[in-house]
Each structure stands twice: as C-alpha cells, then as structure tokens.
Amino acid sequence: EVQVVESGGGLVQAGGSLRLSCEASGIDTFDNYAIGWFRQVPGKAREGVSCIRISSGGTFYADSVKGRATISSDNVKNTAYLQIDNLKSAGTAVYYCAAGVPGPTSLCGGWEIWGEGTQVTVSS
C-alpha cells in the first residue's frame, strides 16, 4: 500500500523556522512521483504551498511562501522536505503532503495519496 506520512510540525515562534518531512512508502519508483505540500485552516479551502517533481527537481512555490520556503527530496529515503523560514502567524495550519504521478508535461499534479497532516502553530 502506497502511503505518505508527515512529520515535523509543532509550535514555533513567529520569525522562526520549521522543517516538515514527508516520507513515502510502498512506492516502487520515487522518481515517477511529485510531492506536494498543502495547508488548511479550519473553515478555509486547502491551499497549495509547494511541490517538487522528483525526477527533475523542478519546484513550485506559492506566493505566500516564495522566498521563505525550500522544498527538497532525498531519493534514497523516499522523503521530501519543506523548510519554511521567517514563519508568520498566517502560517498556522494543518500541513498535508501528497504524492502523485504528474502528466509528462506537468511539473506537479495527479495527487492521489494524501497524508493525515501535521499541525503547525506559529505564535506571535
């Protein structure tokens, strides 16, 4: 069974940094996948934060984190990471990672496997 598990959430002060991990298991070829990070606040729609296409290393960042976030992957560990620096109170949310097989001309997408999420709380 293919699954992804997030870790690394917690309480952090505004201006601090956090590194989230997304470990994929049950995947034959990690290179075939893209990993995406999303976040959701109660009562609001889920927001795409960042994604990485494992084979090419191509990345995307939402404007809300651009310049403060770095997404990366470790193909040996089948794990993707999202570091966010200079966290703001607006970053308080449940962060989810997802795995998908994007189309040949797409950077990311095809999100089929979702984790259960990890809570990030930014205190001001």
Image (cartoon, rainbow, N blue to C red):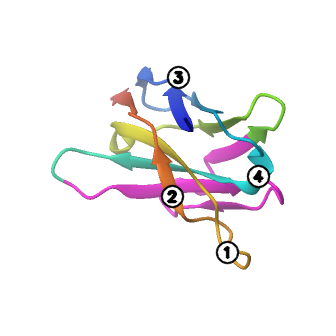
Whether residue 88 is visible: no
Of the residues under marks 1 and 4, which one precedes in the sequence? 4
Q: Which residue is mark 2?
A: 111
Of the residues under marks 4 and 3, which one precedes in the sequence? 3
Say whether residue 105 is magenta: no
Q: Gap in Å between the C-alphas at discs 1 and 3?
A: 28 Å
Q: Are marks 2 and 4 in contact (CB under 8 Å)?
A: no
Q: Are marks 1 and 4 in contact (CB under 8 Å)?
A: no
Quadrant location of residue 118? top left
Q: Residues within 10 Å of mark 2 (few under 14, many from 20)?
A: some
Q: Residues within 10 Å of mark 4 (few under 14, many from 20)?
A: many
Res. 54 mark: 4
Q: Are marks 1 and 3 in contact (CB under 8 Å)?
A: no
- Range covered by the magenta-colored residues: 44-72
Q: Gap in Å between the C-alphas at discs 2 and 3?
A: 21 Å
Q: Gap in Å between the C-alphas at discs 4 and 3?
A: 21 Å
Q: Label 4's element?
A: loop
Of the residues under marks 2 and 4, which one precedes in the sequence? 4
Identity of the residue drawn at 73% across and 75% down: 104
Looking at the image, how many numbered discs can be counted on the residues? 4
**What kind of residue is marked 2?**
Trp
Of the residues under marks 2 and 1, which one precedes in the sequence? 1
Of the residues under marks 1 and 3, which one precedes in the sequence? 3
Q: Which residue is mark 1?
A: 106
